[in-house]
Image (tube, rainbow, N blue to C red):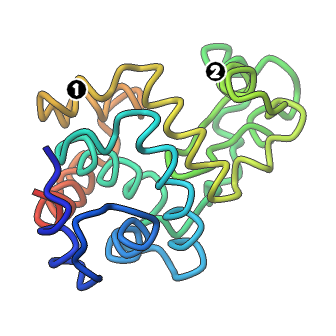
């Protein structure tokens, strides 16, 4: 169970025992997001974290924050800094057309990557992300996309098991940035648990 009062006290926000947009905004800011991004993420998280069970436990929230914090450079980058050229021709990502690597590069807090992922998640949320991939870089849309990706891969179970390595492999496909993910998750745990 998530102790809202303890989290609020650690974040220095009003302690009312109710995790809402203000508490979540403060959490994103504490994890590195600049104010406008933190506010948009907090507003979206207030809805989507509940829908996808991320607020059901402190471990889930801590691991989500740690993993996405790594992927997005502390919630500062909603679009991958690299060009995306490295993803060109990657059939495992559904990048089968010329230019797909750049067009479907990582976006949002979880850095959704690849035409197939954009198509699949877009169909689930009712937004044509394949036709309009740039909108995933909007923090609120990107957070929803991240929650759907998290849910599809049943990552709440890995978070409940405190399985940092399993989460990293499910999100990244390997162990890229494992130590930074560990550090960011530890930071989140200090605030949340």
Which quadrant: the C terminus? bottom left
Q: Residue at x 33, y 54 (%)?
A: 65
Please tell me how crowded label 1 is: few (under 14), some (14-19), or many (20+) other residues with Cα within 10 Å: some
| Closer-to-camera residue (81/29) | 29
Q: Residue at x 84, y 31 (%)?
A: 128
| Closer-to-camera residue (58/188) | 58
**Circle nearer the viewer, 2 or 1:** 1
Res 41 label: none
Residues at marks 2 and 1, CA–CA distance in whole angstroms: 23 Å
Write down the quadrant of residue 158 in the picture: top left
Q: Secondary structure at mark 1?
A: helix
Q: Which residue is mark 2?
A: 93
- With respect to residue 111, does 155 lie above or below? above
If you read the primary sequence from the N terminus, does the residue marked by circle 2 or circle 1 appear first? 2
Determine contact: label 2, label 1, CB under 8 Å.
no
Q: Residue at x 13, y 57 (%)?
A: 3
Write down the quadrant of residue 189 in the picture: bottom left
- With respect to residue 42, does 182 lie above or below? above
| Closer-to-camera residue (138/12) | 12
Counting from the top left corner in percent of width and height, residue 84 is at: 69, 44
Please tell me how crowded label 2 is: few (under 14), some (14-19), or many (20+) other residues with Cα within 10 Å: some
Counting from the top left corner in percent of width and height, residue 100 is at: 80, 31
Counting from the top left corner in percent of width and height, residue 63 is at: 25, 45
Q: Secondary structure at mark 2?
A: helix
Q: Which residue is mark 1?
A: 158
Q: Residue at x 61, y 54 (%)?
A: 80
């Amino acid at each position: 169970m998530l102790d809202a009062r303890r989290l609020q006290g650690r974040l220095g926000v009003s302690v009312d025992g109710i995790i809402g947009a203000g508490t979540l905004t403060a959490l994103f800011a504490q994890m590195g997001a600049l104010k406008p991004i933190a506010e948009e993420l907090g507003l979206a998280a207030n809805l989507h974290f509940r829908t996808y069970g991320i607020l059901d436990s402190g471990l889930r929230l801590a691991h989500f924050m740690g993993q996405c914090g790594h992927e997005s450079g502390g919630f500062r980058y909603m679009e991958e800094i690299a060009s995306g050229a490295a993803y060109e021709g990657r059939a495992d990502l559904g990048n089968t057309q010329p230019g797909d690597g750049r067009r479907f590069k990582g976006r949002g807090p979880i850095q959704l990557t690849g035409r197939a992922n954009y198509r699949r998640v877009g169909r689930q949320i009712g937004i044509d992300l394949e036709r309009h991939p740039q909108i995933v870089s909007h923090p609120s849309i990107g957070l929803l996309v991240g929650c759907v990706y998290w849910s599809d891969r049943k990552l709440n179970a890995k978070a409940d098991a405190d399985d940092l390595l399993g989460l990293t492999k499910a999100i990244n496909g390997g162990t890229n940035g494992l130590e930074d993910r560990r550090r960011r998750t530890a930071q989140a745990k200090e605030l949340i648990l």
